[in-house]
Image (cartoon, coloured by chain):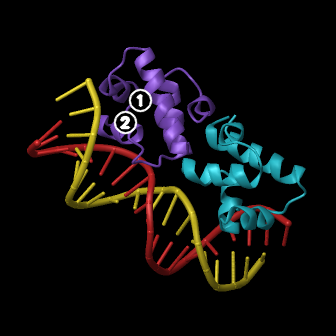
Chain colours: A cyan, B purple, C yellow, D red
Amino acid sequence: MDIRGRLARNVKAERSERGWSQEDLADASGLDRTYISGIERQVRNPTIVIVERLAKALKTTASALLD
Amino acid sequence: MDIRGRLARNVKAERSERGWSQEDLADASGLDRTYISGIERQVRNPTIVIVERLAKALKTTASALLD
DNA sequence: ATGTGACTCGTAGTCCGTC
DNA sequence: TGACGGACTACGAGTCACA
């Protein structure tokens, strides 16, 4: 599984653990809802600054999201 | 320290642990020497795919580089 | 051996939608 | 609720000459 797959898996896991929709995460992170969708479908290659924003919204770390 | 700072610190640490120049890392990762320089000076905001390439060249993980 | 500015080109990331 | 598309702007990828 490549790095995009791992990010997708971890974001989905953290998000549903909170019972959040993609839109909830979009609001919490200040990112676009379609962009969250793209990350989870592995069609996006985000920058590390974006991964950090996701991590903060999900109360975890960038490292954990890429594990 | 933000995520770019942590990446810069960890790349520098792993690189000098191997006694590698920026150019050695550039060769091993297939990236340009000046691009490596930009990452270490925190003027770049690389994508996760780039971080993965650096991690492989340094025989570590993307997670570790962002810790 | 490294820092830096400038550049082209592709894609990151946003916003509007429909299904 | 989420997949997916089109159009758009901003910025990252990748490279060079020079200090």
Dot 2 and dot 1 within a common chain: yes
Give the residue at x 80% y 65%. A24
Q: Of residues B36 and D4, which is closer to you in this image?
A: B36
Residue kind at label 1, given as amino acid type? Ser
Labels 2 & 1 near each other (Cβ < 8 A): yes
Report how many numbered discs are placed on residues in the image.
2
Q: Which chain carries label 2?
A: B
Binning the other alpha carbons within 10 Å of mark 2 as few (below 14), some (14 to 19) or many (20 upward) gives: many
For label 2, the residue is B36
Q: In this view, does B21 lie above or below A47?
A: above
Give the residue at x 47% y 49%. B45
Residue kind at label 2, given as amino acid type? Ile
Q: Mark 1 lies on which chain?
A: B
Where on the picture, by quarter, is residue B12?
A: top left
Q: Of residues A60 and B59, which is closer to you in this image?
A: A60
Give the residue at x 56% y 43%. B3
Q: Give SS at disc 1.
A: helix
First of labels 2, 1 by sequence position: 1
